[in-house]
Image: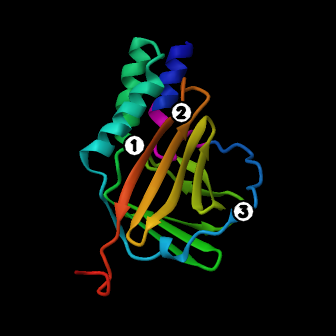
């Protein structure tokens, strides 16, 4: 019965996925740090290539390697499907109002506000928050049995890295990987 419960849960989890019943999340921590304004602006396109896509798959494999054979196969398939590298991301900020668009899925919220309910990649309702930690913008999704954190940081004027952590007490280990995005150079930066 425990395996069946795990399999059903894994079918519900995804990018920010989880069960539709929301836990009572703790209030978000106050942001500490300052994200450079250059993090926000034009759309960015995935620039990590096959190497970073392969790292996502390897991270899923590592996180599920201690599961039994049946659960592992189902979990890996589902987790790889819901953790594909998005082709485009866009980060916008107007005061404390933040917008993150990931492959056309729009997430809006206030910095350091209580969690709001949004639909994750699988269509399940999850709690989402935004906060700043150091020089990173943190977008956190939480469902009943786990969640996902996207940490966006500026590498240089045209490069943003999205560090991802998928977590659940039902996974033997967190899924952790990084994806690189670039924005087109401005007319002043173009050769």
The residue carrying mark 2 is 174
Question: Nearer the N terminus, badge 1 or badge 2?
Answer: 1
Furthest-bottom residue in this view? 188
* Pick the front one: 174 or 189: 189
Q: Which residues are magenta?
A: 11-20
- Judged left or right of residue 27, residue 162 is left
The residue carrying mark 3 is 32
Indicate yes or no whether the magenta region holds residue 5. Answer: no
Residue at image position (33%, 45%) is 52
Q: Residue 122: which numbered mark, if any?
A: none
Can residue 99 be spotted in the picture? yes
Quarter of the image for residue 11 reads: top left
The residue carrying mark 1 is 83
Can residue 13 be spotted in the picture? no
- Image quadrant in which the C terminus is located: bottom left
Structural crowding at the residue carrying mark 1, measured as other residues with C-alpha within 10 Å and reported as few (<14), some (14–19) or many (≥20): many
User: Of helix, strand and loop, which one carries label 2?
Assistant: loop
* Pick the front one: 93 or 134: 134
Furthest-left residue in this view? 191
Whether residue 65 is situated above or below residue 28 in the rendered picture: above
Mark whose residue sits in front, 3 or 1: 3
């Amino acid at each position: 019965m425990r395996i069946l419960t795990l399999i059903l849960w894994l079918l519900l989890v995804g990018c920010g996925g989880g069960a539709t019943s929301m836990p009572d999340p703790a209030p978000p921590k106050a942001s500490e740090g300052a994200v450079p304004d250059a993090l926000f602006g034009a759309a960015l396109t995935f620039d990590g290539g096959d190497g970073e896509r392969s790292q996502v798959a390897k991270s899923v494999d590592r996180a599920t390697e201690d599961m039994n054979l049946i659960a592992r196969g189902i979990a890996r398939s589902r987790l790889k499907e819901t953790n594909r590298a998005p082709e485009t991301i866009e980060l916008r900020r107007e005061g404390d109002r933040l917008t993150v668009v990931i492959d056309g899925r729009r997430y809006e919220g206030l910095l350091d506000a209580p969690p709001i309910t949004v639909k994750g990649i699988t269509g399940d309702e999850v709690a989402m928050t935004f906060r700043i930690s150091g020089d990173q913008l943190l977008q956190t999704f939480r469902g009943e049995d786990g969640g996902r954190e996207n940490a966006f940081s500026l590498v240089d004027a045209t490069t943003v890295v999205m560090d991802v952590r998928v977590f659940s007490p039902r996974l033997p280990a967190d899924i952790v990987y990084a994806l690189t995005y670039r924005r087109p150079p401005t007319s002043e930066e173009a050769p």
